[in-house]
Amino acid sequence: MAVSIQVKLNEKLYLRDPQDTRLGRQIIEHSIFLIDEIGFEAFTFKKLAERIGSTEASIYRYFENKHLLLVYLASWYWEWMRFRIEFRTMNIQDPREKLEIAIQAIVDCTQARPSIEFVNSEVLHRIVVSEATKAYHIKEVDKENRDGFFLSYKALSKQIAGFIQEIRPDFPYPRSLASNLLEMASQHLYFSQHLPSLTEVEVEKREVGQLVELLRFFAFGLIDGK
């Protein structure tokens, strides 16, 4: 059964919050499936409008362009991930266990699970793996960063960095390690599927245990100085 939640995102990402209307939720739901099917480069608002039986003009009332839609989708995923980690760790005292939970959480969206209402988290995870770097590997990244477009990603990274600092307060690179764990979770899953000679990780039928072990090896090896 679908879960109904409202994720609060930077208002500069949209002209009208798509979560507030039926059409807006259709735009989010079907853009996820369409980008997953044809890729971000081939994705257009015209194709999305045809998919949902609407018009391009109606989609432009929510998003100025497809880049902002991609940033919105990625931000939605990052906020949802941060919420899941916070929920799973709220009663945990051991910081090492918190980091273990975080590592598992940033990987296990590859596994099937009930969807959030109008957001299929498994399909959205595939988009984050294959397309999310296009949200911030752009010429205008500094301006968009000043406008707060990437606050959700930075908040998620800060959350994980906090666990690292709890484990070892004198660890010199908590932010670098946290952001690398997030990037590795996506990069090595992508490598395993498309460029397998770049990783030892093998992902078969949603079995992501090797990827979890890779992140654990790097995280705790560096934290423990091994």
Image (cartoon, rainbow, N blue to C red):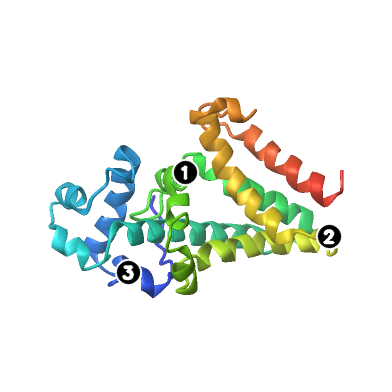
Which residue matches tag 2?
A: 168
Identify the image quadrant of the C terminus: top right
**Local SS, label 1:** loop
- Circle 3 packing at 10 Å, graded few (<14), some (14-19), many (20+), is some
**Local SS, label 2:** loop
Q: Residue at x 27, y 43 (%)?
A: 42
Rendering coords of residue 190 (x, y %): 51, 36
Pick whichever, 133 or 211, lies toward us: 133
Q: Of the residues under marks 1 and 3, which one precedes in the sequence?
A: 3
Splitting the image into 4 quarters, where does residue 202 fall?
top right
* Three-letter amino acid code of the residue under disc 3: Tyr
In the picture shown, does residue 108 fall above or below 210?
below
Q: Of the residues under marks 2 and 1, which one precedes in the sequence?
A: 1
* Three-letter amino acid code of the residue under disc 2: Arg
Q: Residue at x 61, y 44 (%)?
A: 184
**Which dot, 1 or 3, sits closer to the camera?**
3
Which residue matches tag 3?
A: 14
Splitting the image into 4 quarters, where does residue 5 fall?
bottom left
